[in-house]
Image (cartoon, coloured by chain):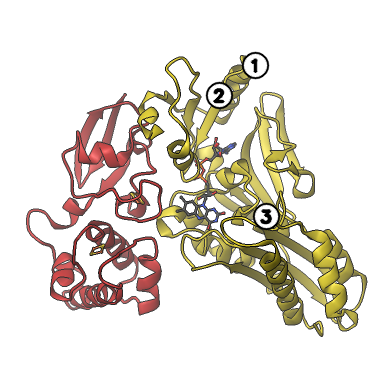
Chain colours: A yellow, B red
Amino acid sequence: MSLADLPLHDMQRAASLDALCGIVAERHARGEATVLLAGGTDWVVEQELKPPRGDADPRPLVVDVSCMAELRGITATRGLLRIGAAATYLEIRRHPTVIERAPMLAAMARELGAIQIQARGTLGGNLATASPAADGVAALAAYDASIVVKSVRGERRIPFSALQTGYKQSTRAPDEVIVAVEIALPPEGSPWLWRKVGTRRAQAISKVALAGIAVRSEDRVVRLGLGMASVAPITATLLQTRALVLSRPLSAITADALDAAVLSDIAPIDDVRSTREYRKHAAKAVVRGFLRDLGAPV
Amino acid sequence: MKITLTLNGLSREVDLPPLVRLLDALRGPLGLPGTKEGCGEGECGSCTVLLDGEPVNACLVSIGQCEGRAVTTVEGLSAPHLGPLARCFVDHGGAQCGICTPGMLISAEALLARRPDPSDEEIREAIAGNLCRCTGYQRIVDSIREAARERREAGGAA
Ligand SMILES: Cc1cc2nc3c(=O)[nH]c(=O)nc-3n(C[C@H](O)[C@H](O)[C@H](O)COP(=O)(O)OP(=O)(O)OC[C@H]3O[C@@H](n4cnc5c(N)ncnc54)[C@H](O)[C@@H]3O)c2cc1C
Ligand code: FES
Ligand code: FES
């Protein structure tokens, strides 16, 4: 077990975000890897699964970002919610503005892992690991969040729609640090859904998870965000489904059209947690459930 | 790397490679074997300790991340004698083989510190990250509910 490897890694703290960007950039230029250790709930577990490194193999430098002030904190100004990349799920689910204005995010955080995982895990880690099963990423997809990243070249915002390019591939450069995520808050009281289809509530990675937010105006949905985990090589944003729902009155949406749109949006596989067929079935059912809550006859 | 932390209320310094797991630092050089290792992957909760008051898996935290922070282990809840919470586990059958018990006690402590009068559902959520292969959980829920009641009657002191 290569946990024995862990003590052989070097760990530092960076004095500031700029200093951190400098360390990452310098090492990247030399072809050396840097791990930004936040909650360790992905990285430490991964180390356990890896074969031991040989003595000559380069080990990444680990920088502890779990207490870095510039990556923490949750703030809301004029309809924009900003969550630090190193804020924990526990901080997210307990934050009054999140509970009030982004209840779907609070629900996601409440059902991610168990409390011990929530007390350590972060959206920065969830985004960087970039598993298609990631719950936090699915929620961010539904909010059409922006990912704030920073490097020695400066800060920029990546719209969620431009983030993921393939399985664990993204448009974030290897030397860009995730600083925060920003969410344009829907009006208070907007309908939302967080639904994890899994074996049990705590700890289990879902077979399918759906994050949804909607803004409704009479018989129409005027803003719709959907994010689905575990149904494609990347987090599915269900663009055909969104387009269908936005294109017509709720009363004119049929179950058949909705199912067809969902199926065209996903590409599930068989794996240890579920099958392709079950995932298709579950994906259709959870989207129908959300649309039914919104008032569509499906 | 020299790391200073507050451990069970006392300031302690250790000199260890920073990525040594908090779990190994506790059970080894810090001399507190009460915290148990089950899975080593964050699944079972038997290594649960409080980090600045919140329950975390000590198998996923590195000692270097504990600089300047407060860690509470099961020894900090009970030493030198069985504390009231642990006694409720004994009295109500909340402990059988005992492997999960230190983690259960810490998770229960974290809950009771925030929620003096938790519902059964809140108790179950609080211990959802703690696996027990002996009790079937109901007796653990009973133990925690009883500890909460005693604590309220004692004015929060127990
Ligand atoms: C028992 C258990 C249950 C879990 N349940 C769930 C679940 O239900 N749903 C779910 O989605 N996930 C789950 N996870 C996975 C994990 O908890 C999450 O993915 C979590 O968000 C990871 O965050 P972290 O801070 O712990 O990441 P870390 O492990 O600290 O880091 C992970 C990776 O992200 C990089 N990184 C961290 N921060 C940054 C940053 N600011 N900028 C750039 N890179 C960064 C690191 O370099 C590292 O490569 C579970 C894990 C465990 C062990
Ligand atoms: S040993 Fe840490 S969670 Fe199982
Ligand atoms: S008492 Fe044996 S595992 Fe819980």
Q: Residue visible at 44% across and 20% down? A: A54
Position of B134 relative to A289 (above/below): above
Name the spot of residue B55 as percent of width and height, x first.
Answer: 35, 55
- Classify the position of ligand 3 by quadrant: top left, top right, bottom left or bottom right: bottom left
Asked if one can make out residue B119 in the rendered structure from this viewpoint, the answer is no
Location of mark 1 (residue): A29
Q: Is residue B112 left or right of residue B41?
A: left
Q: Amino acid at mark 1?
A: Ala
Q: Secondary structure at mark 1?
A: helix
- Is A226 rendered above or below residue A16? below
Chain ID for label 2? A
Q: Chain of mark 1?
A: A
The residue labelled by disc 3 is A140
Query: Could you say which is closer to the camera, residue A207 or residue B102?
Result: A207
Residue contact between numbered discs 2 and 1, judged by CB atoms under 8 Å: no
Secondary structure at numbered mark 2: helix
The answer to whether residue A211 is left or right of residue B89 is: right
Give residue A19's mark: 2
